[in-house]
Amino acid sequence: MEPKKDYYAPMHSAEHILNQTMVRKFGCKRSFSNHIERKKSKCDYKFERPISDDEIIDIEGKVNVILQQKLDITEEFLSYSEAVENFNLGKIPDEDSERIRIIKIGDYDACPCIGAHVKNTSEIGTFKITTSSFENGVLRIRYKLIK
């Protein structure tokens, strides 16, 4: 099955890793909004405060450790009833409700997704947060990949 969203695969795969890193580090939810492009991307999180320079360095480090592990990125399909028990399906279009595609990044992340991904984290490059901002309960993280 071909992915429906035409995201730049390395950047989109990095977004999944950033999201799981944010969930693990801060206990927040995955980004509620994102914009994925080849040169730079951004993720928006419901958050209570800005993040510090030290936290930015820590997030980058954690994401890059995962990238360096050369984890396989695989897909599996679940029935809607199986998927809804384990995942938030709010971002999945209604027409995809029969079979839900789950993207797995090794044992680090699993998430419903309709976008394009690389086959292994070794294809992504180095993750770099370029800026972050906080306004009205929204933390925005902008990032790029360095090959």
Image (cartoon, rainbow, N blue to C red):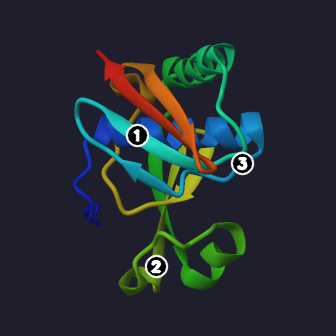
Q: Earlier in the sequence, mark 3 or mark 1?
A: 3
| Secondary structure beneath label 2 | strand
The image position of residue 31, as x and y in percent, is 54, 51
Closest to the observer, 19 or 2: 19
Q: Residue furthest front?
A: 136
The image position of residue 130, as x and y in percent, is 41, 21
Real-space CA distance between mark 2 and mark 3, rounded to the nearest whole angstrom: 27 Å
| Secondary structure beneath label 3 | loop
Q: Which amino acid type is marked by label 3?
A: Cys
How crowded is the residue under tag 3: few (<14 C-alpha within 10 Å), some, or many (20+)? some
The residue wearing badge 2 is: 99
How crowded is the residue under tag 2: few (<14 C-alpha within 10 Å), some, or many (20+)? some
Task: Tell me if residue 145 comes above or below residue 90 in the rendering.
Answer: above
What residue is rendered at 72% in x and 44% in y? 48
The residue wearing badge 1 is: 42
Determine contact: label 2, label 1, CB under 8 Å: no
Closest to the observer, 87 or 103: 87
Closest to the observer, 40 or 61: 40
Left or right of 134 on screen, residue 115: left
Real-space CA distance between mark 3 and mark 1, rounded to the nearest whole angstrom: 16 Å
Task: Tell me if residue 53 comes above or below residue 90 in the rendering.
Answer: above
| Secondary structure beneath label 1 | strand
The residue wearing badge 3 is: 28
Q: Nearer the viewer, mark 2 or mark 3?
A: 3
What residue is rendered at 41% in x and 32% in y? 120
The image position of residue 36, as x and y in percent, is 32, 44
What residue is rendered at 26% in x and 40% in y? 37
User: Number of callouts in the render?
Assistant: 3
